[in-house]
Image (cartoon, grey):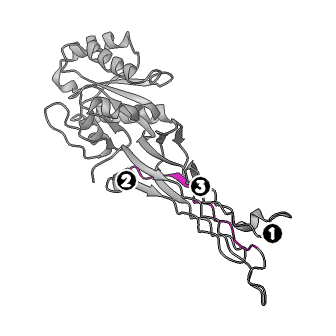
Amino acid sequence: MVFVDELTIEARAGKGGDGVVRWLHEKGKEYSGPAGGNGGNGGDLYVKGVRDINLLSRYRGEKKFEAEDGQDGQSLNMHGSRGKDLVILIPVGSRVVNRETGEEFEILEEDKPVMILKGGRGGAGNTVFKSSVNQSPMECTPGIQGEHAELYIELRLIADAGLIGLPNAGKTSLLNAITGAGGKVAPYAFTTLDPNLGALYGKGLGFKFLRHIARTRLLLHCISLESDDVVADYNIVHDELKGFEKGILEGKPEIVILTKTDTREPEDIEKVIAAIAKINPTVTTVSVIDDVSLKNLQDLLAKVLG
């Protein structure tokens, strides 16, 4: 299944049922008075968060979502039934934007429906219009259309930690080594075609997945020791994050992980650590072929995340 983290759909709340003109029929008197019922209200449209990050993938072939219309009024002053509400399930962490009104809804709680579109009100039957001066009203009103909109749904994953770094920084390899997530690995840039989900979150497509960093508790910044300029690599990633969304890094702790320690001499690694520590003092090193360094990193994460 292809992972989908954004989707645009057409959505409509239900139309209200029409009010009707009806009459009481009594023996010896064909029209004994108005008896037209009101139309039922149209169903509302809700979204509800659930713990399933793959939900948006299931909607790729279904772009129109409509709540049920209200039923028209009936004889004997009987009102039409209210239309059934429609509840669209979306992953917890999603942001829903009503492109008609500009309203935004953050879905951060599980199993708590949030109304997005209101159903239309049912029309009035002719009984409503009866008065002392109008004993046989012929008036009725139609039901009102429900609200409709194009909805943009964007998933921002809620996770303990997010792996960031330039392509080939060793993010996917590290993710696989720690969590067994099984991400695709190859010796060229941009091999992580989709987010890899484990205890950590792997990134490889740059801007497409930057939105997911916003809701992580901790950033794990991977920098390859194969780089000619580790400090420059660090700054490139930070500049990209800041350019994507103002304040995305504020209040978010960051651990710099220097990867691929097997590619450099220990003396060189110490110099790199000293250079990075001037920017961020929380620095550690790891190699996916060194079980001791992996265990040390896991212990550090457990301590930081509590």
- For label 3, the residue is 144
Which residue sits furthest bottom? 27
Disc 1: which residue: 135
Residue 92 x, y percent position in the rendering: 48, 47
Q: Mark 1, residues whose alpha carbon is within 10 Å: few (<14), some, or many (≥20)?
A: few
Q: Residue 248, position in %: x, y?
A: 45, 24
- 10 Å neighbourhood of mark 3: few (<14), some, or many (≥20)? many
Q: Earlier in the sequence, mark 3 or mark 2?
A: 2
> Disc 2 on helix, strand or loop?
loop
Label 1 – label 3 distance at C-alpha: 26 Å
Q: Kindly identify the residue that appears in the image at 32 percent across and 11 percent down.
A: 274
Distance, label 1 to label 2, CA atoms, is 48 Å
Left or right position of 168 against 133: left
The magenta span reads 34-55
Left or right of 127 on screen, residue 274 = left
Circle nearer the N terminus (1, 2): 2
Q: Which of these two is toward me, 210 or 114?
A: 114
Q: Nearer the viewer, residue 206 or 37?
A: 37
Which image quarter: residue 259? Answer: top left
Instruction: Quickly name the residue at label 2.
Output: 63
| Spot occupied by residue 300 in the image (x, y as percentages of width and height) | 41, 31
Taking the spot 47% from the left edge, 55% from the top edge, the residue there is 89
